[in-house]
Amino acid sequence: MHWLNDGDIAMSLAHDQAGRSAASAPNDLEAFWMPFTANRAFKARPRVIAGAKDMHYIANDGRKILDGAAGLWCCNAGHNRDAIVAAIQQQAAELDYAPSFQFSHPKAFAVASRLAAIAPGDLDHVFFTNSGSEAVDTALKIALAYWNVQGKGSKTRLIGRERGYHGVGFGGISVGGIVSNRKLYGTLLAGVDHLPHTYNRAEQAYARGEPAWGAHLADELERLVALHDASTIAAVIVEPMAGSTGVLAPPKGYLQRLREICDKHGILLIFDEVITGFGRLGAGFAAERFGVVPDIMTFAKGVTSGAVPMGGCFVRKTVFDAFMQGPDRAVELPHGYTYSAHPLACAAALATLDIYRDEGLFERAHALEPAWADAIHALRGEPNVEDIRTIGIVAGIDLKPRDGAPGSRAYEAMERAFHEYDLMIRITGDTLALSPPLIVGEAEIGEIADKVRKVIRAVA
Ligand code: PXG
C-alpha cells in the first residue's frame, strides 16, 4: 500500500496545466473515473476548477471563469455565498450527523416547513433525499405505494416521456427518454411507456417562453390510457421544462392538458423540478409559473445552491394522508437514505432559502427574463445556429452538427469557451445550454452573450 499525499497530487496537476500530457502524470488524473465525461479527452486537456465566488469560478491556473451554467444548473444563489458558507461551518461544528430513521434534528423539520410554505397548492409534505436521481426514484416509489395502500395494486405502470431526463437510477432511466442513457443497462423497469417529446423545430423555432404549438401532444396520454387502461397506470412523470435534452419549454396549455387527463383517469402527475425549482423559470417552481399543481414534485440542486448535496419530493396532502393509517408504531413507507435530511444539507438549505427570500432572486429572475431572452436571441443568424430557445433564465442554442461528427462542434465550443473565453457552458449533443446563477446582472448577461457569440464564430 502506498499513500499519496496532497503535495504529490497538486504538483502533478500543475505539470499537466503547463502542457505535459496526462500520461506523464498517471497518479493524479487516472484514478478518477469521471461521470458523464469524455474521460480521455478531458485528461488530455483538463478543465480543473480550484475556487469560486458569486458569478465566477477560478480555474486551476488562476483565470476567472464566468459561470454560464450555475455549475450544473444548481448554484442559483451564486457561489460561495458568505451566509451559506458560515451556516455549513457552524453546523459541522455543532452536529455532524443525526439519523433520520426514528430520530431527527431540528433543522430537518425547519427546512421541510419552509419548503412546504413556498411550494404551490397543497404540496405540504417533504421527503428528503441526497440527489435528484434519488428524488425521482422516491417519487416513483411513493406513487406505486400510494395505489397499493389504497387497495389498487394493479396500478403499476409508469409513464415518462421521450427526451426526458430523470437522473440515473433504474427508475429514472426507465421513465427517462434519452437513448444513450438507457441502451447499455438491460431491460430496466417493466411496464413503462413514454409520451412523445414536444419539440418540433418547424413549428417552434426561436421560441421565447412557451411555444404556441404542441398542446395537442398531451392527448397522446389518452392513447396510452386506451392501450393500457387506467386501472394499470400509476403515474405520469415529466420535467415541466426538459433541461438536459436542450431546454424544451412546454407548449402553451400542454401541462394543463396533462393535468386534466390525469384527473379524469385517476393517474398521479409527477413534475420533476430538479432543474426548474428554486427560481430558474422566474417563479419558485415551474408548477407556479405554469399554474399546474402536480401530485408529487421532485427537487434537488438549487435547494442548497449546490453547496451540499440534497434533494427530495414534495407530496400533496391527500397522498401523504393515504399513508398515515394502520398501527401507529408501524413504518408507513419503508424507504429512505442514511443521509436523508443530513444536518449540513439542512443548514445549507436554510441559509440558501434566506438568500432567495431576502434578495428576491425568484422575482429577479422573472424581471430579467426579457433582457436575457433579448441578449440570447440576438445570436440568431450567427454561423451554424439552427434554433434558439429561452425561458426563465435558461437558454438552449442548437448548432448544426458537423458532417459525420455529431457533437464535435458543441464539444469544441465547451472547450474553447473554458480555455479561451473564460466562460463555462453546458452542452448536450450539438446544443449549448446556458443557465447562469440568478444573481446574474444585465452587464453579465451581455458578457455571456458576447462570449458565446465569439465561441460560436470560433467553431464555425
Ligand atoms: N431530474 C432532472 C430533471 C435533472 O435535470 C436529475 C433528475 C438527477 O439529479 P442528480 O442530482 O441525481 O444528478 C437531474 C439532473 C445537464 C445536467 O447538463 C443535468 C443534470 C445533471 C447533470 C447535468 O443537462 N440534471
Image (cartoon, rainbow, N blue to C red):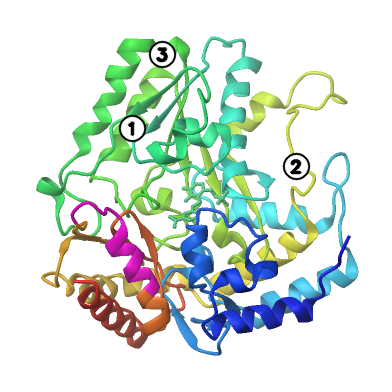
Magenta residues (range): 403-415
| The N terminus: image quadrant | bottom right
- Whichever of labels 1 and 2 marks the residue nearer the N terminus, that label is 1
Which tag is nearer the camera, tag 1 or tag 2? 2
Q: Position of residue 259 (x, y in %)?
A: 36, 33
Nearest to the observer: residue 217 or residue 184: 184
Q: Nearer the viewer, residue 327 or 43?
A: 43
Which residue appears at 56% of the width and 42% of the height? 123
Asked whether residue 395 is in view, the answer is no
Could you tell which of marks 3 and 1 lies nearer the N-terminus?
3
Q: Is residue 410 visible?
A: yes
Q: Is residue 69 magenta?
A: no
Cα distance, mark 3 to mark 1? Answer: 14 Å
Q: Is residue 370 above or below residue 421?
A: above
Residue beneath disc 1:
258
In the picture, residue 152 is in which quadrant? top right
Q: Which disc number belongs to residue 337?
A: 2
Evaluate if marks 2 and 3 touch, with contact meaning CB atoms under 8 Å apart: no
